[in-house]
Amino acid sequence: MTIPLKSPNPQARYRAVFRCINGCPGDHPLNEVIYHCPACNDLLEVVHDLEPLRMTAPDEWKDVFDSRFMRTFWPFGSGVWGKKEFVCPDVEDENVVSTCEGGTNLFWAEQLGLRWGLEDLWVKQCGNSHTGSFKDLGMTVLVSMVKQMRHEGKNIPAVACASTGDTSASLAAYCAVAGIPAIVFLPKNKVSTEQLLQPIAHGAVTLAIDTDFDGCMAIVQEITERNNIYLANSMNSLRVEGQKTISFELCQQFDWEVPDLIVIPGGNLGNVTALGKGFLMMREVGLIDRMPRILCAQAEHANPLYLSYRRGFESFEPVHARPTLASAIQIGHPVSVKKAIRVLRQLDGAVEQASEEELAEAAAEADLTGLYNCPHTGVALAALKKWVRQRKVGKKDRVVVISTAHGLKFSRFKQRYHAHELDGIESRFANPPIEVAADYDAVRDTLFRALEARTAHIATRI
Ligand SMILES: *Cc1c(COP(=O)(O)O)cnc(C)c1O
Ligand SMILES: [Zn+2]
């Protein structure tokens, strides 16, 4: 028996446009190459007409989403395109470029919760995705729109981005799927080997530039603007639309119960914006009736949003981002800061920071409970741990940590942690391999000593 695909109201004509975040007049179609408001030069955002979305009742939408989720009706099985009407209705189905992204598991972090005194702790594994990071959720929308525009006859010879590693991996993969040339600008020696290998393997033109992310960003903007190349960075708000589905999917996975607190690491601040925007949109169409708190977590070495939060968001000053193990969020001048602050204000949001030591230890402690965390997820976990200690989280609160990338993309970080090679970090949970002679007694003695130590370790609580 096949379960039928349910459809929303067939009369509805969905409509979304780009509009200036400062409210300058004028709508711009989503298939126009435009990233900034022509009047004030600030960012644009995608605004949806909610009327057609409201023509299908919330409960019917939930059935529609469930009938599509993780199935094979192109392109609706994707976690992103299963919410197509709320994301990017303008792309024709045959122009969608998808790897069936989204649909990532929610890990019940039982053991970590026990250690930290939380009974309802979950980790949304957004890194269990095609290229190993949540960036796929936004990139599928952006590259689909490029394919659509090329199909309509627009001259877009290539797509380019500056990246701290994961955006370029994702862009390269999606462009390869679509047969569109990709160009990536990476800060030299500042991304992991795995992240460098991904665009190389996918055939992207890969430039390693002797600067940091903020430096790459300045160059890519000029190159794309002056040479008719499409810009894939998150100032391109199409990506936020895809990333927004994290919120929808979370609620769907909890049978539309809204969590109490969501912790998410932030660098360029597109993802925290997307998360908040998703919840606001769901409330506006009646899919949910309450909102979660959002805690954005930054590395202390790249913490401009945290500093602004401490001033009550009264002002924002970019910082010079210092090197951090959380390399994907080593950003001092986040592109989406205005959008992020606006969303955090609407959701009673907060910002916390984590030191290098805190993020490394939190990532490793959580690994010990069966996760395999990237350093950015470590930042989010460390921020949560601080909040638990400060009693800002209730024991019974439902807490979701957004894991942004797969730990397998950051082997060097793990290797150095477990070898006690990270400067100034104790590596409290290091578990290096034990070298032992090929001799029964030696192996048995070593083994039982080690087992005792591990058992004590596992029982630790904060
Ligand atoms: C991009 C990225 C982030 C930060 O997301 P922003 O939208 O830039 O705030 C966090 N973690 C990982 C692994 C990333 O790739
Ligand atoms: Zn404007």
Image (cartoon, rainbow, N blue to C red):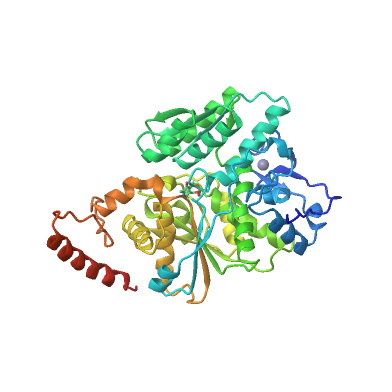
Give x and y (percent) for residue 442.
13, 61
Residue 162, position as x, y percentages in the image:
49, 35
Q: Nearer the viewer, residue 367 or 332?
A: 367
Q: Is residue 364 toward the left or the right of residue 294 in the image?
A: left
**Would you say residue 271 is visible in this rendering?**
yes
Q: Residue furthest bottom?
A: 395
Instruction: Determine which quarter of the picture holds residue 177.
Output: top right
Q: Quadrant of ligand 2?
A: top right
Classify residue 444 as left or right of residue 156. left
Q: Quadrant of the C terminus?
A: bottom left
In the image, residue 84 lies at what x, y percent?
Answer: 70, 48
**Residue at far right of view:** 11
Q: Is residue 197 above or below residue 355?
A: above
The vertical placement of 153 against 125, above or below, is above
Q: In this rendering, is residue 281 above or below 387?
A: above
Q: How many marks?
A: 0
At x 58% / y 22%, what residue is drawn?
A: 227
Q: State the image coordinates of residue 36 (x, y, percent, origin top left).
A: 63, 37
Question: Residue placed at 65% from the left, 33% from the top?
Answer: 146
Name the quadrant of the N terminus: bottom right
Residue sitting at 52 percent across and 39 percent down? 170
The answer to whether residue 237 shows anywhere in this view is no
Q: Residue at x 26, y 62 (%)?
A: 428
